[in-house]
Amino acid sequence: MYSKIKKIQEQLTSGQISCVELTQSYLKAMESDNKKLNAYVNPTAELALETAKRVDRKITSGEQLLPLEGIPMTLKDNISTKGIETTCCSKILKGYVPIYNATVWDILQNQNAVLLGKTNMDEFAMGSSCETSCFGGALNPHDFSRVAGGSSGGVASAVCGNLAAFGLGSDTGGSIRQPASFCGIVGLKPTYGAVSRYGLIAYASSFDQIGPITTSVEDAALVYDAISLYDEKDSTSRGRVSAPASESLNKSIKGMKIGIAKEYFEGIRGDVNEAMQNAIKVYESLGAEIVYFDMPSLKYSLSVYYILACAEASSNLGRYDGIRYGYQAEHYADRDEMVCKTRSEGFGDEVKRRILLGTYVLSAGYYDAYYKKAQNLRGALVKAFQEAFTKCDVVLAPTVPMTAFPLNFTAQDAVETYLTDICTVPVNIAGLPGISVPCGFDASGLPIGMQLIGDRFCEATILNAAHQYEAATRETTFRAADMGVKL
């Protein structure tokens, strides 16, 4: 059994450890290890211990635990938590304490999941390294001189470093899958609408999606099943439309058609390509049929993503003006200067760049040339995926064309950093589910991630395909935190 969640619950219900003792062990590990990893920006020890005590009382009374009850976990710092500071790791939101919970946190809180704290991220989820955070970036547990990835780098660092059993991140263009790939763990980006976005502080509303980061595919399925509920507070919500994905993890994939679009493999590093080819061989040995095809529209995906996402960001971030909440400039002559200074001082450079780009493509004279054309190409990409899924059940691709890059790499080569999104953004553009699973290591021992993409609301299909691969290769491709619990 690879499920850390099930392993922990077995230890709890059998009396091997109390939930308070378990929580204290994680909090102790956070005290020592987080100084180096910088995964957490806001620990919530008091709340965690209160929840743990409730779980222990329930166990003592003989009540059955819910699937995620008593499990120490974390939330990315753009998921609203009532009464707990939520900053998006931006100076402009320092001191902001939400008066309501995100729906996903309501769900987990009702299950008595143990929140250890809020985790680091790129500012407003804009970045691929976690280094745009106003708290400094989270580090990669495999190599402290490397980034954990972004934008959900803190969640990935905490889960990989055994400072949380699982975490929730958000994925706008790869922000769950890319750090999961860099840290050698599992990251699931659900179908757009499967998980409520209510309470997620928006970057680009038609792309954003909340999902789990875990150490196994089974855990990703368990968390996905818990949070994929219909929510009337989110107008785009549909929830999970089929049976629980965790009940479909042991189906044979013999005869399953796995698609390979050659465009996904153009420009990727040699060792990453080798790992993909080895993964394809594993699937062939499991009885899957490999189907090769072309998807020419994929080459436009990065341009489409950055035009549309930045356009939406320029609108969504307009609310941060120093008047209603958050940071406000100290010295100004009038209201206009106050708003200008607040936004100039409060936002980091990467956020400013994306707001400027978004404002530009929406401006008169450029709207048709950029924004409208990008929307049309988005439609073409959606159709291309629809056609692809008439040929195959799942598309296999690299998660990232490279492994985790060194600290400060973004400042040295911004273009190369943006290119790390090239394999992940098509999933967000088309609103599809995608999962990243470890599939090998480079010469330096850094993890390589493989991505499986499914049709809309086919999470069970990609989770089962990923689970079968994990079962066949676990000993050689997974090197994240062990299955035990730190005591």
Image (spheres, grey):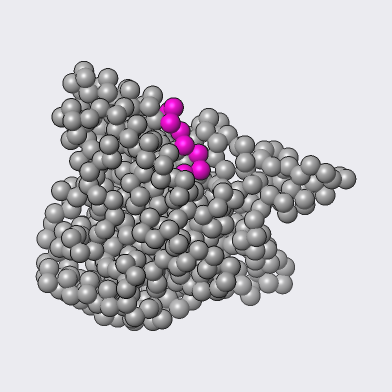
Residue 190 visible in the snapshot: no
Q: Residue at x 30, y 80 (%)?
A: 293
Across and down, in percent, residue 143 comes to: 39, 60
Give, as a single range, the part of the protein colored magenta. 40-47
Q: Residue at x 59, y 50 (%)?
A: 134
Residue at position x 82%, y 49% from top?
337
Tell which of 27 and 419 is nearer to you: 27
In the image, residue 2 sits, relative to residue 451, either above or below, namely above
User: Is 406 left or right of 275, judged from the image as shown?
Assistant: right
119 and 462: which one is in front?
119
Specify the farthest residue to the right: 333
Is 6 rendered above or below residue 123?
above
Q: Give the answer, above or below, for where 340 lies relative to 113.
A: below
Residue 339 position in % (x across, y down): 77, 48
Residue 44 counted in the magenta span: yes
Q: In this rendering, does residue 98 appear at all? A: yes
Q: Tell me where residue 115 appears, x and y as whole percent.
A: 40, 35
Rendered location of residue 385, percent (x, y) = 36, 70
Horizontally, residue 342 falls left or right of residue 266, namely: right
Q: Nearer the viewer, residue 95 or 230?
A: 95
Total tally of numbered discs in the picture: 0
